[in-house]
Image: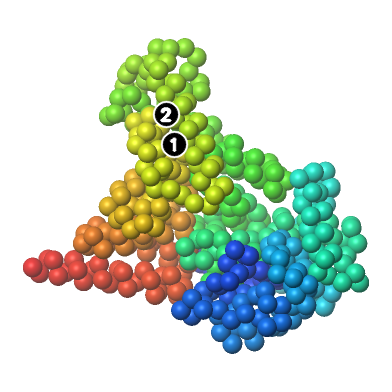
């Protein structure tokens, strides 16, 4: 815990480090990640709990450490009789068991003096009571917990709804080094942090430990003026505000959400003149033909229809791949080819397609394609996510790593240095990602550059 003071807080400063009140591993990783440290098992092997036969551990030490948390839920998970317990049900189960064991007195400090207990977290009780989607979720979770929790431990309906509200609104996705969600955690102190689509701080993880680091210089640690993002910053203003209202019950009025220009850019078409970089807002054009305000290129009704068709096709395929949790390189490649010259390079659907194409190409080891997509993705990724965002740093790192593999050490060194500038701010130089993964790549790239120069 860091002290409040009047000194300027430089970007990259860790202003909060916190362990979870409760946390769970996502069920889809149940058999290949440790339930205690959330890491993958040694050589892919994990040990099963002999009691419930449900959770796994990477070694005996983690199993011993995990037992402190798991012993209360072990008999409950055993009652599941081999069925997968929904992640939200397991989080609530752990909350109920912890509160029953005196956990309500636990404090999560966000300054040396100020803290939050579980009861201090916002429950949004009235909002949830009027949200049919949430009520149906509560009913399904109640049914699951009735089957695995004894009657004397099951809260009444009002208390259960309050626990559910605090869980659903305050839960964090616990992320691995690749920014993949691997678990869910409730962190008491950090719950004081509000949202902005233009944040000045970022949450990152090392295992289950959460760190809040500044990504701008701040005059002091004033938690009323420190913001992280709750949503995908590469979504449109409309989508971000909708998701925040739907999931967190507030209308975002941050600087980005009030910007009239950004929605146009995020949904823009490209000028038919390939040399022109103007944003064409087909939604606002009332009659055709018309001209580009920047270069006077003629824009026809056929151009508009082509733009609308490709936008619709892209949305359909992105939704389909999102639902399946799989991105297909062939589909992404076809979409990107159709989008080029029709969707603007800063159109978020184009960028999201590039992102999926990039990751898909890496997955099948098509390095030339991956490099092409990654380089094309970088400007838009930085524009919408911000200069100091872990996702941008990781993208630079992945591109640099591919360039190093393809024997482009000079280009690799450039991107790896960009990654370093970002990741040492968002993760810190002692984080495993920076120290043990990025630094060796930087050294290798620098050595290969020196070797090429000497030759």
SS label for mark 1: loop
Whether residue 238 is situated above or below residue 227 in the rendered picture = above
Identify the mark at residue 347; answer none if there is no mark: 1
Viewport quadrant of the C terminus: bottom left
Whole-number angstrom distance, CA of label 2 to CA of label 1: 7 Å
SS label for mark 2: strand
Left/right of residue 56 with respect to residue 250 in the rendered view: left
- Residue 93 pos. (x, y %): 77, 68
Write the residue at 52% across / 36% down: 316
Write the residue at 70% across / 69% down: 82
Per the image, the residue denoted by label 2 is 269
Dot 1 alpha-carbon crowd within 10 angstroms: few under 14, some 14 to 19, many 20 or more: many
Dot 2 alpha-carbon crowd within 10 angstroms: few under 14, some 14 to 19, many 20 or more: many
Whether residue 50 is situated above or below residue 410 in the rendered picture = below
Q: Do the residues bearing badges 2 and 1 touch, measured as CB atoms within 8 Å?
A: yes
Q: Quadrant of residue 50?
A: bottom right
Is any part of residue 15 visible from this angle? no
């Amino acid at each position: 815990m860091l002290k409040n003071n009047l000194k300027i807080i430089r970007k990259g400063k860790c202003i909060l480090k916190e362990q979870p009140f409760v946390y769970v591993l996502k069920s889809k990783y149940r058999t290949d990640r440790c339930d205690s440290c959330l890491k993958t098992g040694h050589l892919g092997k994990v040990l099963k709990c002999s009691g419930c036969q449900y959770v796994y551990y990477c070694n005996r030490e983690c199993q011993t450490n995990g037992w402190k948390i798991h012993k209360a839920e072990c008999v409950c998970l055993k009652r599941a009789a081999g069925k997968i317990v929904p992640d939200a049900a397991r989080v609530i189960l752990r909350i109920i068991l912890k509160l029953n064991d005196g956990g309500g007195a636990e404090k999560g400090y966000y300054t040396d003096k100020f803290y939050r207990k579980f009861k201090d977290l916002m429950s949004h009780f009235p909002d949830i009571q009027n949200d049919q989607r949430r009520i149906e979720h509560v009913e399904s979770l109640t049914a699951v917990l009735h089957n695995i929790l004894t009657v004397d431990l099951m809260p009444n309906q009002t208390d259960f709804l309050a626990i559910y509200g605090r869980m659903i609104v305050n839960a964090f996705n616990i992320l691995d080094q690749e920014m993949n969600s691997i678990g869910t955690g409730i962190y008491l102190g950090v719950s004081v942090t509000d949202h902005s689509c233009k944040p000045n701080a970022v949450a990152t993880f090392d295992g289950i430990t959460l760190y809040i680091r500044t990504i701008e210089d701040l005059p002091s640690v004033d938690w009323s003026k420190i913001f992280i993002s709750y949503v995908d910053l590469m979504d449109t203003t409309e989508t971000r505000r909708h998701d925040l209202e739907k999931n967190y019950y507030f209308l975002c009025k941050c600087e980005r959400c009030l910007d009239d220009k950004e929605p146009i850019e995020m949904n823009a078409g490209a000028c038919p003149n390939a040399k022109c970089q103007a944003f064409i807002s087909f939604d606002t054009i009332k009659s055709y033909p018309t001209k580009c305000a920047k270069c006077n290129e003629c824009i026809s009704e056929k151009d508009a229809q082509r733009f609308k068709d490709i936008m619709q096709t892209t949305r359909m395929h992105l939704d389909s791949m999102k639902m399946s949790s799989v991105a297909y390189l062939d589909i992404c490649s076809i979409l990107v080819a159709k989008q080029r010259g029709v969707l603007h390079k800063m159109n978020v659907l184009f960028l999201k397609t590039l992102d999926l194409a990039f990751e898909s190409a890496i997955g099948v080891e098509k390095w030339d394609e991956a490099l092409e997509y990654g380089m094309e993705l970088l400007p838009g990724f930085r524009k919408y996510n911000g200069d100091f965002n872990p996702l941008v740093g990781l993208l630079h790192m992945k591109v640099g790593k591919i360039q190093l593999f393809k024997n482009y050490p000079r280009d690799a060194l450039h991107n790896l240095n960009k990654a370093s500038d970002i990741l040492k701010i968002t993760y810190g130089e002692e984080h495993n990602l920076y120290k043990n993964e990025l630094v060796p790549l930087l050294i290798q790239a620098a050595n290969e550059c020196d070797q090429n120069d000497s030759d």
